[in-house]
Amino acid sequence: MTVIGLDDTDSRTLGMCTTYLATLVAEAIEANGGTIERLLLIRLNPAVEHKTRGNAALAIHTDFPAGQAFELARAELERWAVIDDDRTSPGLVVAPGSADTVPTAVTQFARDAVRDFHTVEAAVETVAHSGFLAQGWHGGRGQIGALAAVGAWAAFDSWTYEHISYREFYRCGTPREVDIDSVFESADAGYPTAWDTVDHGEGEAVCVPNAPGPILHGIRGDDLTVVREVAAGIESEPVDREATFLTNQGTDMHLQSGTVADLRDGHAYRVTGTVESEPETRRGGHVFFTVSDDETTLPVAAFEPTKRFRNRVRSLRVGDELTLCGEVSDGTLKLEKFAVRDLVETEATTPVCPECERTMKSAGREQGYRCRDCGTDAPGKVETDIERDLELGWYEVPPCARRHIAKPLVRGGFDAVTHPER
Ligand code: ATP
């Protein structure tokens, strides 16, 4: 077996897409008599600043001999990669042998690529030690992602599917013709096995991208047959070609456990804390609050694109106990989901007179409260119930704001009740 890793072939403005290149390489292998065992679409650390969009890297598992696979992939890459864009820095890595038995250094490289940062030099060195074939163009930064994609199969234990349908290439850059009603109908038929296809709250077909590339739609889910069925149910302009990828999307693989005191920028965490300041909506509709843990304060943000999720965040009160998930950037945690572990359900209020039901007045410093009209009194403030519109359990951003790698609550396996968005 041979494993081909590819990355960084597209441009934010000029289109293309590395998944498309992987599909073309796979077709070329088949046209030359090889067999494709599987295609992987790997999402790496979402905090990497060089990313075009979703920090994806691709792997192809095939029975084609490594040397020939390398030549063929190189030819397709040179033909299709948007090398005119200075920011595009393609990489190709080809590993002879099974994807199950890559060296430990390569599996570790793949794990770290999701949660941490690598240099091109580290990738080139690991490639050389492992006896892989590799090439980089324009600095070859894509070799980082390509090597991570080679190691992913042995490194990761949680997989989902994405079925991608591509446009006729000459249409790229023109508006996509997709019947939105059919998207919603098909999405509902496949839910919850297929998730993040649409956003009911926003009325948005999340599976149809806005970027200029060749993807018509991508259907994500837990079952191969279901994602294909959902795609088949969508009425649209002609589908030119399609491919199903195994992915680490929707897995939360980017999150590591942390404590408020030792979070680092560029990493994503699952962390516990107590709400310390009342959520505040600032210019642009972004909502900010702070949590604390043992005297360390962590600023937390729910940005405008997270839409209705911000109402959940605004419902938080000082004293609520939370588990928070998100990436830390400039010292602020960008919230992707949170679990309410304990809700503040009472507050100290001035007592009400049992006779006339009006609020009592202070009877003087440390002398309690009194109703002057009725002569009733009370020794101090009383605890009254607060109406909360949050419950215990997990809340998440809606599908329209989901990061590729973030796990939707509807997938299950969380440690408390969930309140999924759809
Ligand atoms: P594309 O569709 O082209 O794959 P993208 O949004 O996935 O677009 P890339 O163009 O691939 O972004 O850019 C991401 C770059 O960052 C690649 O060169 C990749 O090798 C590199 N990269 C990925 N993960 C890491 C990491 N953990 N540390 C450092 N660099 C990384």
Image: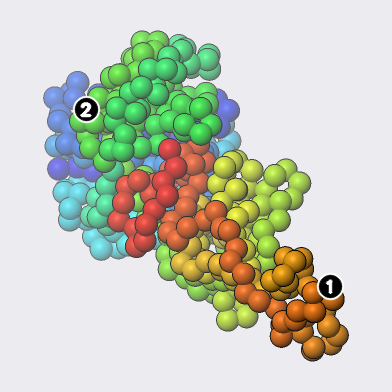
- Compared to 263, does 170 lie above or below? above
Residue 362 versus residue 409 in the image, above or below: below
In the image, taking residue 107 as reference, residue 347 lies left or right, namely right
What residue does disc 1 label? Answer: 373
- Indicate the amino acid at tag 2: Ile
In the picture, measured across the screen, residue 328 lies left or right of residue 356, that is: left
Residue type at the position of mark 1: Asp
Mark 1–mark 2 Cα distance, whole angstroms, equals 92 Å
Task: From this view, report whether residue 51 is shown above or below residue 28.
Answer: below
What's the residue at 36%, 13% (across, down)? Answer: 235
Q: Residue at x 28, y 19 (%)?
A: 232
Q: Quarter of the image holding residue 123?
A: bottom left
- The x, y position of residue 250, in whole percent, is 37, 46
Q: What residue sits right under mark 2 in the picture?
A: 29
> Is 79 situated above or below 261?
above
* Closest to the observer, 43 or 188: 188
SS class, disc 1: loop
The residue nearer to you, when weighing 359 against 214, is 359
Q: Residue at x 60, y 63 (%)?
A: 386
Q: Quadrant of the N terminus?
A: top left
Label 1 within 8 A of ligand 1 by Cβ: no
Nearer-the-camera pick, 277 or 21: 277
**Mark found first going from the N terminus, 1 or 2:** 2
* Total tally of numbered discs in the picture: 2
Which of the pair 128/88 is nearer the observer?
88
Q: Is residue 258 left or right of residue 236?
A: right
Give the class, few, some or many, for how many residues have Cα within 10 Å of label 1's Cα (few <14, many ≥20): few
- Residue at screen point 35% across, 28% down: 187
Q: Position of residue 331 (x, y in %)?
A: 63, 64
Identity of the residue furthest to the bottom in this view:
366
Percent across and percent down for residue 405 are 41, 47
- Measuring from the top left, give residue 329's x and y in whole percent: 60, 58
